[in-house]
């Protein structure tokens, strides 16, 4: 049976629901492309119609569409071979018809070992002779150079009020009778994600010809179980098996759980626990990436859950108590400018992706320099990465206004000039090519899909070690 999400995918931009302003901005970008020649980034949460809008745009304008997935072709050579060839073709066989190059999951160039893929895409969009649409869930996971070289259009979460009419139209086309309250329940449960709502509607109908409120069991999970009690269980009290069982009652995919746990683990775990947890988080990221490189083979999610939930719970050293203020969702929390600065410095100086620097190197740095001890190592870290007082305090857990931190920063500045030379940027001002060695390290667990070495994490720690 065909998935309704595919059967009712919008065929024209006018059929794209819930993001009228973004839809119109995309149409205007295409209409004036000959004048500006810019690539565009469509970004927003999963399920809001980003990729569908890109294909609908191509259909509206009579353009051929070529879609690539960044999880499939994330190396520099692969991207230059495929996207580069398409984007630099001035004409297609048989005439001067344009070709729209669609790069889906472009933010995943920083999700795995990108081997220079982000730099390759940036060069391509600057020189493209064909229009390019980049699709991303997380706009700020794109390289800064890529963001600067493109136009951005945000697709916002779709309100339940906009989802209900879509579900109603599908029921009528499928000759399914429905209780309005059933459609409203699905729309409320999946507010923001139209694709999930259509999927849940099909599941509720289940091959029948009617849907009632009693039929609505969205994803089969109890949506009353909140994410914060679940995080408390993983980080504070539950063993690995109990944590896994609790994850079945949370309305989050393994991919979303990875984002929550990766973002919040530092609020509870000590540095040593956090460093061990990153091995399992890295493994989970690889398993999730495999889902998107195997025709959406979701059986790999099982192994992602084992790592991100069971693995993170297993490395905890005893129970943690007390109340923890976790803050908002990780994909909307951009307030920690200091962390972003530190991660950016690591990535730039070590020539690696932001994702790799954040997940693999930062926790190790924190464990190695906790409370500025040993002092000599902390000084060399501050000098190598050019960290200010706020950044040193963030990494080490010390107070940024203390004399100790101020002296470490000053000594690091003096040490830097004669002893530590950061890698030089290229002619375009970009950081060193990650192709020089940005394979993500593997872990010692048997559930790792890619057992590789840990040389890049060592390289990311710099010469101060």
Image: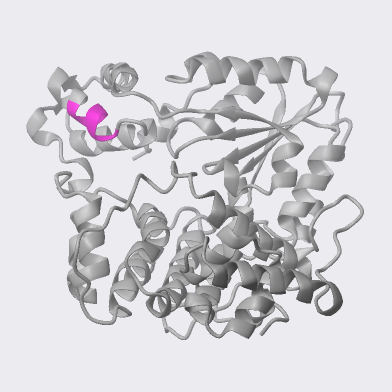
**Left/right of residue 98 with respect to residue 341 in the rendered view:** right
Residue at image coords 48%, 77%: 370
The magenta-colored residue range is 185-190
Q: Main secondary structure of the magenta part?
A: helix
Given residues 2 and 317, the one toward you in this image is: 317
Where in the figure is residue 395, as x and y percent of width and height? 53, 68
Looking at the image, how many numbered discs can be counted on the residues? 0
Residue at image coords 79%, 26%: 98
**Left/right of residue 253 with respect to residue 372 in the rendered view:** left
Is 184 inside the magenta-drawn segment? no
Where in the figure is residue 461, as x and y percent of width and height? 65, 77
Where in the figure is residue 66, as x and y percent of width and height? 69, 38
Q: Is residue 49 above or below residue 88?
A: above
Where in the figure is residue 25, as x and y percent of width and height? 62, 18
Q: Is residue 315 above or below residue 50?
A: below
Residue at image coords 55%, 63%: 358
């Amino acid at each position: 049976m065909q998935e309704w999400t595919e059967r009712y995918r919008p065929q024209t931009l006018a059929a794209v629901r819930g993001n009228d302003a973004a839809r119109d901005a995309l149409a205007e970008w295409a209409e004036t492309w000959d004048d500006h020649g810019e690539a565009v980034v469509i970004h927003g949460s999963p399920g809001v119609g980003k990729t569908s809008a890109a294909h609908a745009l191509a259909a509206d304008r009579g353009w051929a569409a070529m879609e690539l997935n960044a999880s499939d072709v994330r190396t520099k050579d692969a991207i230059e071979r495929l996207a580069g060839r398409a984007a630099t073709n001035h004409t297609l066989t048989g005439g001067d018809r344009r070709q729209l190059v669609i790069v889906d999951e472009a933010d995943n160039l920083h999700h795995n070992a990108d081997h220079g893929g982000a730099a390759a895409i940036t060069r391509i969009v600057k020189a493209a002779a064909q229009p390019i649409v980049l699709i991303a869930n997380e706009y700020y996971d794109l390289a800064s150079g890529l963001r600067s070289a493109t136009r951005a259009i945000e697709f916002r979460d779709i309100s339940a009020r906009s989802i209900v009419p879509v579900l109603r139209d599908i029921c009528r086309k499928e000759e399914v009778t429905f209780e309005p309250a059933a459609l409203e329940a699905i729309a409320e449960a999946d507010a923001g994600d139209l694709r999930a709502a259509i999927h849940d509607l099909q599941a509720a109908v289940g091959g029948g010809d009617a849907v009632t409120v009693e039929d609505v069991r969205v994803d089969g999970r109890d949506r009353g179980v909140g994410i914060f009690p679940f995080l408390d269980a993983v980080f504070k009290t539950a063993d690995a098996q109990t944590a896994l069982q609790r994850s079945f009652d949370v309305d989050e995919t393994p991919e979303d759980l990875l984002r929550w746990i990766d973002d919040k683990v530092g609020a509870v775990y000590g540095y040593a626990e956090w460093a061990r947890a990153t091995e399992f988080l890295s493994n989970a990221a690889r398993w999730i990436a495999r889902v998107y490189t195997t025709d959406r083979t979701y059986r790999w999610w099982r192994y992602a859950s084992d790592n991100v939930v069971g693995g993170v719970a297993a490395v905890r050293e005893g129970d943690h108590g007390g109340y923890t203020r976790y803050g908002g969702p990780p994909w909307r929390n951009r307030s920690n400018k200091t962390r972003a600065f530190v991660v950016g410095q690591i990535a730039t100086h070590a020539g690696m992706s932001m994702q790799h620097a954040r997940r693999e190197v930062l926790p190790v740095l924190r464990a190695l320099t906790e409370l500025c001890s040993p002092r000599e190592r902390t000084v060399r870290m501050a000098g190598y990465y050019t960290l200010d007082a706020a950044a040193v305090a963030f990494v080490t857990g010390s107070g940024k206004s203390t004399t100790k931190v101020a002296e470490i920063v000053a000594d690091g500045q003096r040490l830097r000039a004669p002893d530590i030379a950061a890698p030089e940027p290229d002619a375009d001002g970009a950081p060193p090519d990650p192709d020089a060695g940005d394979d993500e390290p593997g872990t010692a667990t048997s559930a790792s899909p890619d057992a590789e070495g840990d040389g890049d994490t060592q390289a990311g720690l710099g010469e101060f070690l």
